[in-house]
Amino acid sequence: MKLRLVSIDEQIQSCLDTIKQLDFKESSIKRHRKHLLHLRDYLRSNGKNSYNENIGEKYQFDLLSEGIFKDYRLKEIRHTINFLNDIINQVPVRKKRVYLKVYPLPGDFGKHIETFLQHVRKESRPTENVMRNYKAALSHFAVRMQQDRIRLETLDQMSISRFISSLQNTQLRVCVPVRRFLRYLFETNIIKTDYSIPLYDIKCHRAEKLPSIYNNEEIRKMEASIERSSPTGRRNYAIFLLASRLGLRGSDIRFLQFNELDWDKNVIKLIQCKTKKIIELPLLNIVGEAIIDYIRNGRPKSESKTIFLTANAPYTTISVPGISSIVSHIIYKAGIDTKNRHHGSHCLRHSLATRLLKQGTTLPVISEVLGHSDSQATMTYLNVDVNGLLQCSLDVPPVTDGFYMQKGGWFYE
């Protein structure tokens, strides 16, 4: 009996059904569907109607040879192809990210955790994913305290250490929320001892990276590439200038409100989302004019107090990833080579700091401009000022032969 070949349309549908069952986000499903349909067009253009792994390899090789996709896009395509390969090979498919299980919050710990999570949501305005991770981590902590019959009155360093030592791969992910929760309990006088202090020693050891920077010519080229005749273009231009000329973080641009712009004094004064520190920056003419142009000719009608809104209805505050995506698109459109460099909004902040450093601006002033809590955070930008470091270097003094031949030296005989 001859086996019926499964068509590419059936294979694609099977792949999408599996992804939906795994409860992927709608944006992820849409992305995978786009890549699968592109693969289907590729098959049909080559006279084929069914997919196998060899075709998948050739497809990726052809895309790489054409050079029309960026590295991150090729990575997405490879991810989709791997999903499809697992489906046709009947290999169990699961989400790339495995989330911690969320348990019910028991007892007094549970009540205080709920209050703490409300506090975090109000003060830090984190994403839903971060909130879920916090609740999951703290639910593990609360359950363990209940199992060990630990109450708030009997909480001590030993019980916390037992919980931390029981963690394996999730130690860092769990410790950060637990540390903040313990600090919250101490600051609100619920417990008398600050048990969060020892947990600060548990850190993620990452390899140090140099910040990604772009020079003046590249920044000017990016600005010139922005189309400013449309409402979206006007918004993107103002966002870009706030990041490149003033060095604002994406989160501060996102939540920038009308009352934080003082047009009489030409300053922007706001409380930074990350550090909670007040920062005051000059409202440069080019930045102010771009914001006014967007408000008058591009911003949708809305009661929102935040300035920058999404381009499509319902008009809401634009997200931080959305701001980074805008900057990334501007960089690509300008034809800037981004190899080995990041291309989100934060790279413009790094670039501004580096330009100030090269102009001879002192570190305390740069720290003030960037809104850093101290100059130590700004020291990162010294790593990229190679010319400045070379000017500080000293010539090596000449060493006479007598130094090496002196008594007690390595070459003494």
Image (cartoon, helix red, strand yellow):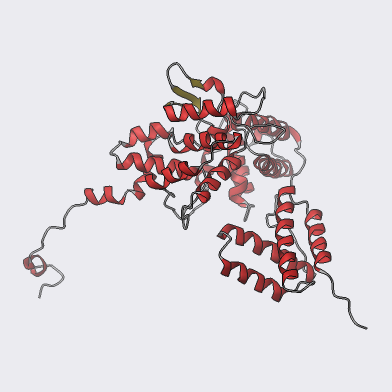
Q: Nearer the viewer, residue 64 or 344?
A: 64
* Residue 90 in picture, x, y percent from top left: 80, 70
Q: Nearer the viewer, residue 110 or 394?
A: 394
Q: Is residue 244 left or right of residue 98?
A: left
Residue 38 higher or lower than 291, as above or below: below
* Residue 275 in picture, x, y percent from top left: 50, 32
Figure label count: 0
Q: Nearer the viewer, residue 364 or 238?
A: 238
Farthest residue to the bottom: give it.
1
Q: Nearer the viewer, residue 146 or 111?
A: 111
Which quadrant does the C terminus fall into?
A: bottom left
Which quadrant does the N terminus fall into?
A: bottom right
* Residue visible at 7% across and 65% down in the picture: 400
* Residue 326 in picture, x, y percent from top left: 56, 43
Q: Is residue 57 left or right of residue 17?
A: left
- Residue 144, quarter of picture: top right
Q: Is residue 98 left or right of residue 325?
A: right
Residue 114 appears in the picture as rendered: yes
Residue 194 appears in the picture as rendered: no
* Residue 312 in picture, x, y percent from top left: 69, 36
Farthest residue to the top: give it.
264
Farthest residue to the front: give it.
229
* Residue visible at 55% across and 47% down in the picture: 329
Residue 55 higher or lower than 115, as above or below: below
